Amino acid sequence: MKLTKHVTLLLLISLSFKPMKGFSQGFLRAKGTQIVNQKGQNVLLRGIGLGGWMLQEGYMLRVNGQGQQHKIRAGIESLIGPKRTQEFYDAWLDNHTTKADIDSMKAWGFNSVRLPMHFNLYTLPADKEPVAGQHTWLEKGFAMTDSLLAWCKANDMYLILDLHAAPGGQGNDLNIADRDGSKPSLWENEADRLKTVALWKKLAERYRDEPFIGAYDILNEPNYGFEDPENDKNGLKEQNNVPLKQLMQDITKAIREVDENHIIIIEGNGWGNNYNGILPPWDKNMVLSFHKYWSLNDSASIANIINFRKQYNVPVWLGETGENSNVWFTEAIRLFEKNNIGWSWWPLKKIGTNNPLEIRSNEKYMHVINYISGKGSAPAGDVAYEGLMEVARGSNIRSNILHRDVIDAMIRQPFSDKTLPFKNNTITKTGTLDAVDYDLGRNRAAYFDTDTANYRTSNPKWVGGNRGRVYRNDGVDIIADSANAGSYCVTDLVTGEWLKYTVNITLKGKYNISFIAAPGKVPGKLAIAIDGKPIGKVTVIPAKENRNNGWQTYALRNVALKNGRQTLRLSAETGGFDLKAIRFEKSPVP
């Protein structure tokens, strides 16, 4: 299929990132504390998980509260009926992940993909089997996996299979595994455990000779209190983890009966990190996974898993992380790779900005979501259907919003403090820069913001990011301009914060430079520098007189600019105002 111009552009942005050539070299395996290829070379996995494809978690769709997929589906079915609900889910599965997604990931610089699998695409639930204890295999999940594997092979990328939703559900965080809390969990139902083991054996039989299958991540984020289910629902304090270890050993045994080639990845309790009672590893080709969110990116934050690696002479892999700001991403990846830890980000796309691709929402769809979330009345069936199908088709990469800043923060910024233009800001006599289009780069290189990431610590200065949650994912606060659809502005500028823009002036001469700003409650002061040299007087932005002040224009006249590429830096000497745009107009003054 011929790529559209839009997707071709997605691939072209990779030119700065230099993806690895000839990366995959046979089966991956564990060798001491390293993951190596068939040549014995260390392999550092840089990947993304396809969260939301086979398994929808409510928050990815903007559903509040209990967002298990089966509840979302039931809500949709109550609006549009079973037939059209199936049309929506078929369209979602067909569009969400395609070869163009994998082609783009490769072009951006990633070398692996983690597939979060929902068991119900591969087999019937245990309580729906026509014959109790037998396993009905469904072709849909296997066919989807085969296609994804083919796309990965075409791009020389490894595919890691991850059982994200196990039969019965592996924890008390119900959304993760689409668990029905009214039924016995995986740990309370022998039939579900037997089905989980059988599914992994079936997968291993199918893919045992496929070197582009990087590993089997056999159970995602178990979170269950075995010893004290009342006070430790998610297993954070579990000391022995006996049922979890037993199931993972049973799965390992079943896999090894048919497949000696592939790495088996295990995860601890408490969302992947509680390994009490589980170690040492019981297989010679095993890797320990851990998950990391919203914590500081220092040596102490990974000390536990590093100690396990050293103590048991086993590789470790960060199976899931993300859902934060670009600053956090850059810090985290630098930390992981400094310690030779491969990683898989979460997720590739959702309705939201802090991932490489964003699925667009629409008004009709949000009526459906508000109804499912208990915040609104039921929309008409035809309205709901139209909104849902628009989102399903819009999950295709050809309709996604590309967040270049997120990709740059993950692939380039961990290893470079240089900045790149966000857009081609060429000024020919006249021109306008949107304030939100400051350069790509790290905090203190492309911009400076005082609250840049969410570390979830007690120190309030460490909680932040883009408060508006639109357009970009840096620390800079951005909101939509309510008066102009599709337009954005920088807001909540604090004293000392600044933004840098790379501009190309085609004609040397004097220019009038205007700032479009909205006054704050107190007077603001805006300073400008060109290539590090202060220009003109500090611009004073008076405090707003009333709530109708809106956007105002403040000008510096007859600023001498050379021709060619140069940097413009805007600094809030006193903050409190919003900034929308910077305009250039060549002055008639010689």
Image (tube, helix red, strand yellow):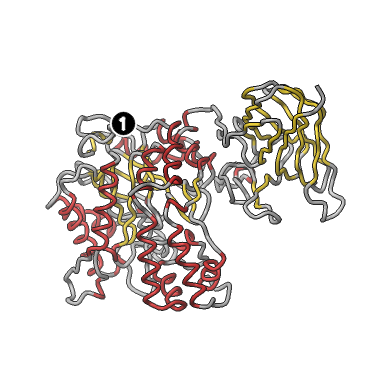
Query: Circle 1 is placed at which residue position?
Result: 21
Whether residue 397 is situated above or below residue 366 in the rendered picture: above
Q: Element at badge 1? A: loop
Residue at the limit of the structure toward the left, as seen here: 257
User: Residue 439's spot in the image, x, y percent?
Assistant: 59, 34
Instruction: Name the foreground residue: 273 vs 375.
Output: 375
Q: Residue at x 42, y 42 (%)?
A: 8
What amino acid type should be assigned to the residue bearing mark 1?
Lys
Relative to 105, 507 lies left or right = right
Q: Residue at x 41, y 71 (%)?
A: 73
Q: Quadrant of residue 584?
A: top right
Whether residue 383 is situated above or below residue 267 in the rendered picture: below
Mark yes or no: residue 232 visible: no
User: Residue 79's spot in the image, x, y percent?
Assistant: 47, 77
Whether residue 361 is situated above or below residue 454 in the rendered picture: below
Mark yes or no: residue 587 visible: yes
Q: Quadrant of residue 576?
A: top right
Residue at the limit of the structure toward the right, as seen here: 545
Relative to 583, 268 lies left or right = left
Q: Residue at x 18, y 75 (%)?
A: 132
User: Residue 244's spot in the image, x, y percent?
Assistant: 29, 57
Q: Residue at x 70, y 25 (%)?
A: 530
Instruction: Name the foreground residue: 66 vs 191.
Output: 66
User: Residue 569's spot in the image, x, y percent?
Assistant: 68, 30
